[in-house]
Image (spheres, helix red, strand yellow):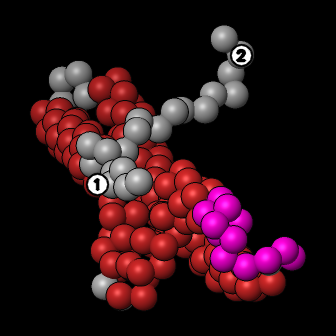
Amino acid sequence: MRHPEPVNPALLEHAKKRADYAQNRIADVITGFAGSMAFVYIHMIWFGCWIGIGVEKYPFGLLTMIVSLEAIFLSTFVMISQNRADTKRQVIADQQWRTVQEEDEQNKRLLDLSEQILALTKETRSLAAFARDDHQQNQELLDVSRRTSELTKQIYASVAASAERQGPNQPPRQERSDRPE
């Protein structure tokens, strides 16, 4: 039974790197088969025929030895499969950590831009109070307004760039709110 292809880009890259080695592909095929019902059915038929045909007499020493060796190898493949699953979990955790770090940095930039906008807004209001008839002060007010507009454009560009980096396969991040609703 084939597992569905991963949709997470980090897991796709990990799967490609893993497929580069023949021993990984062989281990994947063996663990896939050993974990299937076909494996169980084959063993039921094999054991039934072994005992039914009378390949050897009771206590079935050869069969016991063969099954013991098979169990040793299968337990090794189970451990390989667990290691592979651990590696996949680590790949996902690393990607999530990088995303959190990028979002934290973006939040810091957005807070800085918001503080700059607040300062410019306060400056605009104070200049507006004194600049009713003075042309020079009106020019300064216009310059401050332009800078505020430019910072607003930077915020929108930063948010849009972040949305593009997250890509279409990323679920939207849920905002946490400490405010009671």
In terms of depth relative to the viewer, which is nearer, 93 or 142? 93
Amino acid on which the number 2 mark rests in the picture: Pro
The residue that label 1 is drawn on is: 165
Front disc: 2 or 1 = 1
Alpha carbons under labels 2 and 1: distance apart: 32 Å
Residue 151's x, y, as percent? 27, 45
Is residue 123 at all visible to an observer of this figure?
no
- Asked if the magenta segment contains residue 162, the reply would be no
Q: As drawn, is 127 to the left or to the right of 80?
A: left
Q: Say which residue appears at 37% left-offset and 34% top-offset.
A: 121
Residue 152's x, y, as percent? 26, 39
- Disc on res. 180: 2
- Asked if the magenta segment contains residue 51, the reply would be yes
In terms of depth relative to the viewer, which is nearer, 74 or 160? 74
Magenta span: 48-59
Q: As drawn, is 58 to the left or to the right of 11?
A: right
Judge the density around disc 1: few (<14), some (14-19), many (≥20) Cα neighbours within 10 Å. few
Q: Is mark 1 on a helix, strand or loop?
A: helix
Judge the density around disc 2: few (<14), some (14-19), many (≥20) Cα neighbours within 10 Å. few
Is residue 66 at all visible to an observer of this figure?
yes
Residues under numbered marks 2 and 1 in contact, where contact means CB atoms less than 8 Å apart: no
Q: In this view, does 17 lie above or below 134?
A: below
Amino acid on which the number 1 mark rests in the picture: Arg
Q: Say which residue appears at 86% left-offset and 76% top-offset.
A: 59
Q: Is residue 100 above or below residue 67?
A: above
In terms of depth relative to the viewer, which is nearer, 28 or 33? 33
Q: Say which residue appears at 35% left-offset and 88% top-offset.
A: 22
- First in sequence: mark 2 or mark 1? 1
Residue 11's x, y, as percent? 40, 63
Residue 65 image-quadrant placement: bottom right
